[in-house]
Image (cartoon, grey):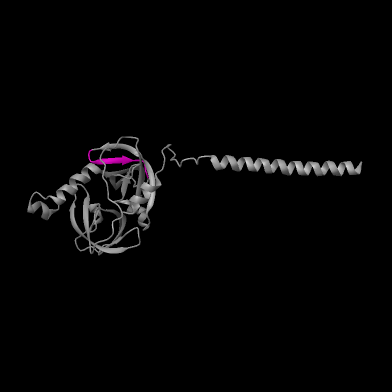
Amino acid sequence: MRKFLVCLATFAVVFNVSFVAKNVYEQLQIAAHAKPAPAVRQTGYKIHGKAIERVKGITVLISNEGFGGVGRGTGVLIDKRHVLTCAHMVQSLEDDLWIYLHDGTMVKGKPLYGSRATDLGILELSHPVKVPSVAVFQDQVKDGEPITIIGNALGSMRWFVSYGVISGQYRDWLLTDGFQIGGSSGGPWINEKGEIIGLAAWGLQGRNGERLGINGAISAKAIRKFLHDWKHPKSFLEMLMGG
């Protein structure tokens, strides 16, 4: 009887090990042929990591260390010598601007051209830098379209990424529920293809200064016109006054 029980126990152990091994093997086989689930936003849209990394490469962090103190912001490389940002980032033509590129390069910049009406400005770099990709501006957007925002949030000197949707449009402004704050100004809003649809500019606040969760950007349409006016000034006076 004792020998029978020992044999039975041995059989149970061997059977259990064999069953587990078979089950693990089958799971491994299934995993080997399974397609990975796509990364998605909470809204159900795929996240295009390559597009985000590409735009990070032309997004710069700005530290304005002028007489009035230190201000932080963001900008976009539009060629080897120029950065597009918000005009409110510049307090005077004497501002000391340090531009930090995503590849670790740091270069001095100075205000070159700006328009307070559109809140856009051009900074000129002290020397040419490498531009890893071309900034593409897309003015075709629709409400509910998912966007990614890249910027120097809170002046943290980091390429902070957040996302939301186009909540609405008003004149030359785009609205979103996406997060942007502090040094985000001048940071690109991009669509799923990595095309820039706007530059972060402001956030709505309540009567007591509380943030209302709705933020605005200067539209790509306004940006296109600004860049055209910069490259093709209508008169010397307009060029002198910055638009």
In front of the other: 57 or 29: 29
**Residue under the image location 38 percent in, 49 percent down:** 161
Is residue 172 in view? yes
Q: Quadrant of residue 43?
A: top left
- Which residue occupies the foreground of this view, 208 or 101? 101
In depth, the one of 221 and 186 nearer the eye is 221
| Left or right: residue 175 compared with residue 27 | left
Q: Is residue 177 magenta?
A: yes
Is residue 133 positioned above or below 204 on the image? below
Q: Nearer the viewer, residue 170 or 232?
A: 232
Is there any visible trace of residue 180 in the rendered image? no
Residue 208 locus on image (x, y percent): 34, 46
Q: Position of residue 97 (x, y in %)?
A: 26, 62
The magenta segment is 171-178
For the point 18% across and 47% down, the residue is 226
Residue shown at 35% from the left, 60% from the top = 103
